[in-house]
Amino acid sequence: MNAAVLGSGGREHAIAWKLSKSEAIEKIYVIPGNGGTCSESKCENVSIPLSDIEELSRFLIEKETDFVVVGPEDPLAGGIADWLWSREIPVVGPKKAGAQLEASKDLSKGFMKKYGVACAKSETFTNLDKALDYIKRNPGPIVIKADGLAAGKGVVVAPNSAEAEKAVRSFMRDGLLGNAGKKVVIEEYLEGTECSILAAVSVTKDFTESGKSTIVPFVPARDHKRLLDGAKGPNTGGMGAFAPADGITEETMEQFESDILKPTLDGLKKEGFDYRGFIFFGLMVTKSGPKLLEYNVRLGDPETQAVLPLMDFDFAEMCQSILDGSLSEFPVKWKKGFVCAPVAVSKGYPGEYEKGKPIKIDSKIISENNCQVFIAGGKIEQGVLKTSGGRVLAVSAFGSNLKEARHAAYKGMQGISFDGMFFRKDISMPGAADSKSF
Ligand code: AMP
Ligand code: GLY
């Protein structure tokens, strides 16, 4: 089989890497890919803009691509899956209607409430005065969320009403996020530990009629969003992840399945979505059980870099089963152990950051420590791998216990260097992911 992976980050590198391990896969086109995917076995980078759907489908058809995995949310929200399916190209990624579960916070909260998914109480506002009035009656801590896609900048956890007012004014009046912030969701603050559950989804009208629609959760993972050790400093796209996440008891998993996963599946079926792809449940595990903070309609980054190396099954075959309705019978098996995946970033990140710094990777140190390097922001220039993004790469290491995985990942990190390189030293340590800001 030939596959294509759309996207250019660390998540896409991990997806391409895992697909390349499948005996059934001959070739993987990574579009556009990055400086890591181009040297992965069976992989070839192809520079076609994802917006050029005609050129993209022409290429995929010419190369007899059996399926396409879409990495990021933007093309999904824009309807890339609908376009490709209409040209009979199978896509692992939801069609536009289902992808709105991530693209609009208001819509996704509406879905959660309609189908009884356990989540925080919330109200949606399009009028600034009404939003300010609501904050007066519900002083902080409270959470302000811009309705639209805002590249991780759309959520403010406000410790008090002054901060909450500032946030709604900047979103609704000053247009800080453009149209994405004209509508806001104001949400009850939940206290607890965060956890990400990625899952494979296979839902279509046909599968639902024949009893085949299903969601299969992966092992829980945990992202570390703050820049600095001890969960301090500004928010980032993710400074590292590990899996399986600790503190997720069997009881929590059962509650997740009954209070979040099942009603979500029910909702996807009842809405009649064609949702064959992945879903990301962003959870807060509170004293009264797990609550859903958000859906993402794709795999998480950097969670994917920690979860995929734990898969003890053929990921390409899983993608096929998502597409053909056999996911409920798919033999899911996980390696017994842990993966820790710290991320190295460029100097200045998450603000303006340096680019174009040569990246040195000591492959002996990497392989001796059971590590895998997933490039996120790196590209080849004149034959040299150089930094091109804020988050540059993740070092994913396997260990039979978490301490071993962490130890190996940080030893692996010693084999990486670039000018201005920075990484957190506490990924997967107890409490390192708590992002409470007050
Ligand atoms: P979201 O994009 O909705 O996942 O929000 C981004 C981050 O904001 C989450 O990962 C949490 O750290 C935080 N957050 C979102 N909603 C809440 C909430 N209701 N209570 C506490 N923290 C929240
Ligand atoms: N790690 C969070 C995300 O992928 O959105």
Image (tube, helix red, strand yellow):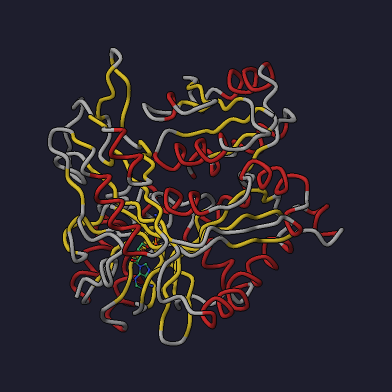
Q: Residue furthest right?
A: 210
Ligand 1 placement by image quarter: bottom left
Name the image quarter holding residue 354: top left
Quadrant for the N terminus, please.
top right
Q: Residue at x 47, y 34 (%)?
A: 7
Q: Quadrant of the C terminus?
A: bottom left
Look at the picture and state if 280 lies above or below 87.
below
The x, y position of residue 147, in whole percent, is 42, 57
x, y percentage for residue 330?
72, 55
Q: Nearer the viewer, residue 399 or 75?
A: 399
Left or right of 332? Residue 299 is left
* Looking at the image, residue 130 lies above or below residue 287: above
Q: Is residue 175 visible?
A: no
- Tell me residue 267's x, y (percent): 67, 66
Q: In the displayed structure, would residue 413 be above or below residue 8?
A: below
Q: Quadrant of residue 268?
A: bottom right
Taking 15 as reference, is 256 above or below it? Answer: below
Q: Determine whether, in the image, residue 327 is placed left or right of residue 99.
A: right
The residue closer to the viewer here, 45 or 155, is 45
In this rendered view, identify the residue nearer to me: 147 or 306. Answer: 306
Question: Which residue is painted at 62% across and 18% down in the image?
Answer: 59
